[in-house]
Amino acid sequence: MITLALSKGRIFEETLPLLKAAGIEVLDNPETSRKLILATNSPDVQVVLVRASDVPTYVQYGGADLGVAGRDVLIEHGLDGMYQPLDLNIARCRMSVAVRDDFDYAAAIKQGSRIRVATKYTQIARQHFADKGVHVDLIKLYGSMELAPLTGLADAIVDLVSTGNTLKANHLIEVEKVMEISSRLVVNQAALKLKREPLRRMIDAFAAAIPA
Ligand code: ATP
Ligand code: PRP
């Protein structure tokens, strides 16, 4: 049995065409079913549904043989025990620094002020500001980052941006791009040895179907 870890929503939806290219169709719809283990048309392939940030944990410890996770999630978790053979070029967005539209970020940086930054992505944010030589106090949040500058909790946020609509709706502006984000395939290192042939076939089929 091959177990693939996916999160509900965009990663599940955007992985479906790749699975199809590998001849695999998921038999349940996660939006309507309460099942967490989904069967496929292939008797030896199953999909497990986990939180996006839990995908690397499942793959690292072998709870799943492989999984799909954002570059953001993988940097925050680390890649211990996993190979990352493919950038699937799905769930594309960027990690950015954003502030209130009336906050003078450039001046704050120039003055060398300590900036309070709220984020779910503390590793990425820490590295970004260290590379720039900017002193920051990081505040860990688990969601709704956009609220932090509006309530005075923080001066800036580090968050994912795609269309920019969420920032705009909350009177925030993007002031720095930190990195481009897409989702990657990750494979448990031991599984790749023990189940080499079927995993290789799946990786090759995914590779051939990556969207441009
Ligand atoms: P969790 O459930 O663990 O809190 P999450 O809510 O961030 O995770 P999703 O919103 O499904 O989970 O996002 C999964 C991945 O999709 C993210 O890790 C990121 O790589 C990517 N992503 C997030 N937001 C967007 C977006 N607006 N557009 C494109 N890709 C995105
Ligand atoms: C993500 C991210 C931003 C938003 C950015 O949230 O946390 O808030 O997308 O996208 P935009 O630039 O196109 O507005 P998501 O849509 O995944 O909602 P979530 O907070 O429920 O995960």
Image (cartoon, helix red, strand yellow):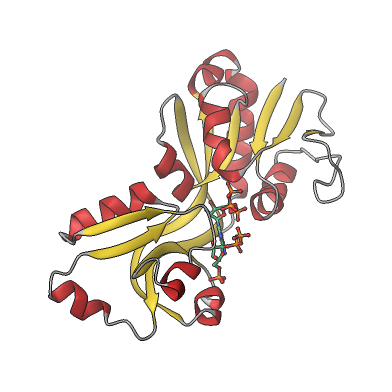
Look at the image and tell me in which quarter the C terminus lies: bottom right
**Residue at the outermost bottom position:** 102
Q: Position of residue 26 (x, y in %)?
A: 81, 40
- On screen, residue 115 versus residue 11, left or right, reads left
Q: What's the residue at 65%, 41% (across, down)?
A: 6
Q: Quadrant of ligand 2?
A: bottom right
What residue is drawn where x is 13% and y is 69%?
Answer: 112
Q: Quick one: 10 or 117, which is closer to the camera?
A: 117
Residue 23: quarter of image? top right
> Percent x, y for residue 51?
63, 42
Q: Is residue 26 rendered to the left or right of residue 210?
A: right
Q: Is residue 9 above or below residue 55?
A: below
**Location of the N terminus (image quadrant):** top right
The picture places residue 35, in percent across and down from the top left corner, at 83, 36
Residue located 56% across and 19% down the image? 191
| Rendered residue at 44%/62% (across/down) | 159
Residue 69 vs residue 36, the one in the foreground? 36
Q: Which residue is at the far front? A: 152
